[in-house]
Image: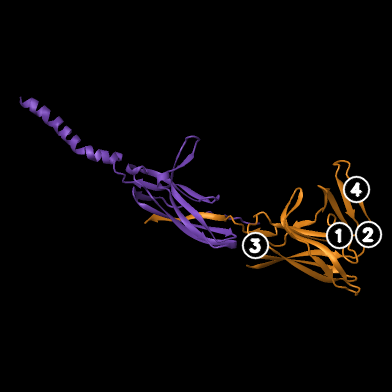
Amino acid sequence: MTLKTLTLDLGTVSSLQYSTGWYYDPNTGQRYYYNAAQNQWYVSLGGYLYALGYMNPAPKQVAVAPGDKFKIIISFKYMGPAITGILSRWAIGVYGALGFTEKIAITPALSIPANASATPVTVSLDQTLTIPASPGTDWDDIYVKMWGGTPDLGGTEQSPAYIYGYENALIVAGVSVVITDFKISDFAKV
Amino acid sequence: MTLDIVLAPLALTPKTFNAGDKVRVTVSFKYTVGINTTIKLCAGPYYINNFPLPNTHHMVDPCVGEADVSLIAASTPTDKTASVDFTLLPKAQGGIEDGTYGLRVWVEGTNAVAEQDGLIIVTGNPGGVSDMFSAMMPMLMMLMMMGMVMPMMEEAE
């Protein structure tokens, strides 16, 4: 089967930790969490924290079929010591009003090499997921999140230090056939 | 300023067939599917009436034909053409009456459907009004002749 790839840009990753805090919207009763290190707001839904605005329109769509290998490449700017044992989660699923419903996910440990220079350098990491035999045609969203490590990037699985995703990144060819542009070309006696 | 031009598919031209003819319909489409699969392509004539609702389309079921079409797994939209045959079964065999019918083609289990009204004109059904008239013609001729001869005979008497 074919290997397909898609790249996500995480922006700048820092090994420093900053103070964070909870906020409350009296109008809606909704609780929010702010991570000053990332300048990122999170919303609390169903016991999990979801970063507001972490899902973005995909820059391109990748067509995949059952059995295909799908490689996700993340890239970011980094400056600091080497970090090992970073926890991460790479997922394909369905993103909706109640957050991201994962359908395929892996949780590899990652490492970032040291960059002792005074300017950030681009680091790329990748992981490959396998599309199962019977994928849903709506499994078209992806995200990657990272937390922990030594030294600690900060965050937890529920409130990761870094999270980024794409909506409508995949065109999944499922078991059911999808037909478009169906028209009669000709008809005649035989 | 921009000019938007939408190119609509050309309408097909109606054709005349005799009852009993076999008709081959060719369709084109794009598809995606994750595994090799087979679809069932169906085609047949339909008529329109106002039962149970206005402008209801009814297939002439005895004339509907089917064909299996194999599709190779394709994760990107792939062009495909396929054909399906159906027979305009004569009325005497429980089939179609003379008249004008629409043509519908569809793929079972999907929302792929194409149709056009008034494409199929069916003639030549034995037992139609014209055939009845032909069969009765000699009898009518005899009656007409008798009608002309009888007054002459009465005058002669």
Can you tell which mark lies on residue A63?
A: 3
Q: Secondary structure at mark 3?
A: strand
Q: Say what secondary structure mark 4 lies in.
A: strand
Figure chain in orange: A
On the same chain, marks 1 and 3? The answer is: yes
Residue B104 location in percent, x, y?
Answer: 47, 48
**In the rendered image, which residue does mark 1 sit on?**
A161
Q: Residue A31: horizontal and vertical position, in percent?
A: 87, 46
B67 to the left or right of A156: left
Residue at mark 2 to residue at mark 1: CA–CA distance: 11 Å
Q: Are marks 3 and 2 in contact (CB under 8 Å)?
A: no
Q: CA distance from mark 3 to mark 2?
A: 40 Å
Q: Amino acid at mark 3?
A: Ala
Q: Chain of mark 1?
A: A
Question: What colour has chain B?
Answer: purple
Q: Earlier in the sequence, mark 1 or mark 3?
A: 3
How far across and how far down the image is residue B123, in percent?
33, 46
Q: Earlier in the sequence, mark 2 or mark 4?
A: 2
Q: Secondary structure at mark 1?
A: loop
Q: Residues within 10 Å of mark 4 (few under 14, many from 20)?
A: few
Pointer 2: what residue? A18
- Mark 3 closeness class: few <14, some 14–19, many ≥20 residues within 10 Å: many
Residue holding disc 4 = A23
